[in-house]
Image (cartoon, helix red, strand yellow):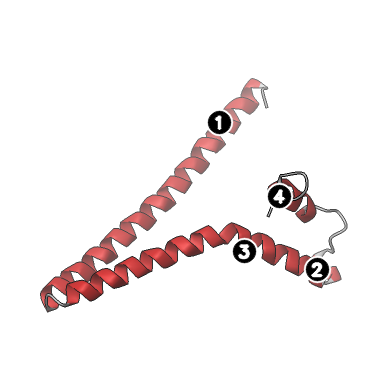
């Protein structure tokens, strides 16, 4: 999906930042909606694939563990829930930490006059 210049990301980025796009009170042009949907689908497709695979693995695990009995199935279901919750909490904490570090670095650089 690369353009003739070999860099599809910059081309898409330039098209999204065009100055002739309509403002919110002027309405939305269908071409702009298609462009934004294309950009969102390109950005979100890896996340969709990853989450689908995660739920598929969990479902298959519970299906096979269900053959062992009710108690192992309940334990596996609780374990999957806890591990998924821990992963989501750590991802959110990681994002907040990155934001905090970036904010501190920007304030430090602006005080030094390097920014």
| Mark 4, secondary structure of its residue | helix
Q: CA distance from mark 1 to mark 4?
A: 30 Å
- Name the residue that disc number 3 marks: 41
Q: CA distance from mark 4 to mark 2?
A: 18 Å
Q: CA distance from mark 4 to mark 3?
A: 14 Å
- Name the residue that disc number 2 marks: 31
Nearest to viewer (mark 4 / mark 2): 4
The answer to whether residue 28 shows anywhere in this view is no
Of residue 58 and residue 4, the one placed in the foreground of this image is 4
Mark 3 touching mark 2, by CB under 8 A?
A: no
Mark 2 touching mark 1, by CB under 8 A?
A: no
Q: Estimate the x, y position of residue 4 in percent, counting from the top left.
A: 78, 48
- Name the residue that disc number 4 marks: 8
* Disc nearer the start of the sequence (3/2): 2
Residue drawn 45% across and 42% down?
97
Residue drawn 40% across and 64% down?
53
Q: Residues within 10 Å of mark 3 (few under 14, many from 20)?
A: few
Of residue 91 and residue 64, the one placed in the foreground of this image is 64
């Amino acid at each position: 999906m690369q353009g003739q210049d070999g860099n599809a990301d910059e081309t898409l980025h330039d098209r999204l930042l065009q100055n002739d796009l309509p403002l919110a009170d002027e309405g939305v042009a269908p071409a702009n909606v298609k462009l934004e949907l294309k950009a969102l689908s390109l950005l979100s497709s890896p996340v969709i694939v990853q989450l689908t695979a995660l739920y598929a693995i969990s479902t298959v695990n519970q299906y096979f563990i269900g053959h062992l009995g009710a108690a192992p199935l309940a334990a596996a279901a609780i374990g999957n829930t806890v591990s998924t919750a821990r992963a989501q909490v750590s991802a959110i904490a990681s994002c907040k930490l990155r934001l905090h570090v970036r904010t501190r670095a920007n304030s430090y650089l602006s005080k030094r006059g390097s920014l």
